[in-house]
Amino acid sequence: MTRSVRLTRRTRRTRRTRRTLQVAGAGVAALLALSACSGTDGSGSGSGKDSSGKLSGEVTVFAAASLKESFTALGAQFEKAHPGTKVTFSFGGSDALAASITGGAPADVFASASPKTMKVVTDAGDAAGTPATFVRNRLEIATLPGNPDKIASLKDLTRSGLKVVLCDKAVPCGAAAQKALDAGGLKLTPVSYEEDVKSALNKVVLKEADAAVVYRTDVRAAGDKVEGVDFPESADAVNDYPITLLKGAHHTDTAQAFIALVRSAEGRKVLTGAGFLEP
């Protein structure tokens, strides 16, 4: 066998091998594409509905800390109305939640305590659709039970020796507090800035602070552990709360149904009962 014949046969074998690998690769790609189209819930659909058309699957909701009590109640209500569903919550400062979402954290729904933090998510292209405002919230001063320091106004918080706590300025409740202080022409140096509204309120509950500027919904949720004091400057710092479906939601129909509950008359009743304002 001549050298040229051997080279020709070797070339043919190499080409056949390459074609085999290409066909195998195409088959794997097709299987992956088919798997992606079949959804992630194991039912052949990413919508969040079972074979009978009923809602199913788990929905992960990232929500502002001030929504904890209301959303927990709505989540239980949703699960009862739709057996086979589960609503899992992650509560915290809206800024931290937004950063987690844009960083790739798996979530289906985002409910923020301000349009500014929601914009972080929409600007990153992580929202599916246009966010809708579902409630509003205003500030209140939380004092120790019985208000032993006789705090009657926002200006009283500037008194010497008074230990006052605020939310961090990056958090919606902190930004609102600063807006209220600016409206009153007041300057206040707190003993600490807290990561979210629950942390700020807890400082008063634990008697580590004399007062905190928080949402009135949180004062109401704390019951007799604190006492609330209204102040007129809070009218200049009312926060809108937007909610949206997120891109990449695993059970879109179920997630949209939860959003619909939040925005419904039934959901509004729970939220306004907790002290939120209608949008």
Image (spheres, grey):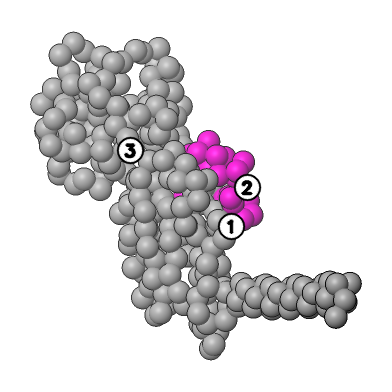
Task: Provide residue 196's location: percent of width, then percent of height.
Answer: 33, 38
Q: What residue type is labelled 2?
A: Gly
Q: Distance between the residues labelled 3 and 2?
A: 25 Å
- Residue at image point 16% right, 26% down: 210
> What is the spatial separation of the Cα atoms under label 3 and label 1, in whole angstroms?
26 Å
2 and 1 marks in contact (CB < 8 Å): yes
Q: Is residue 258 above or below residue 157?
A: below
Magenta span of residues: 111-132
- Rendered position, 45 above or below 191: below
Q: In this view, does 189 lie to the left or right of 109?
A: left
Pointer 1: what residue? 247
Which residue occupies 42% across, 30% down? 170
Residue 196: which numbered mark, if any? 3
Cβ–Cβ below 8 Å for labels 3 and 2?
A: no
Q: How many marks?
A: 3
Residue 126 belongs to the span the image colors magenta: yes
Badge 2 marks a residue whose secondary structure is: loop
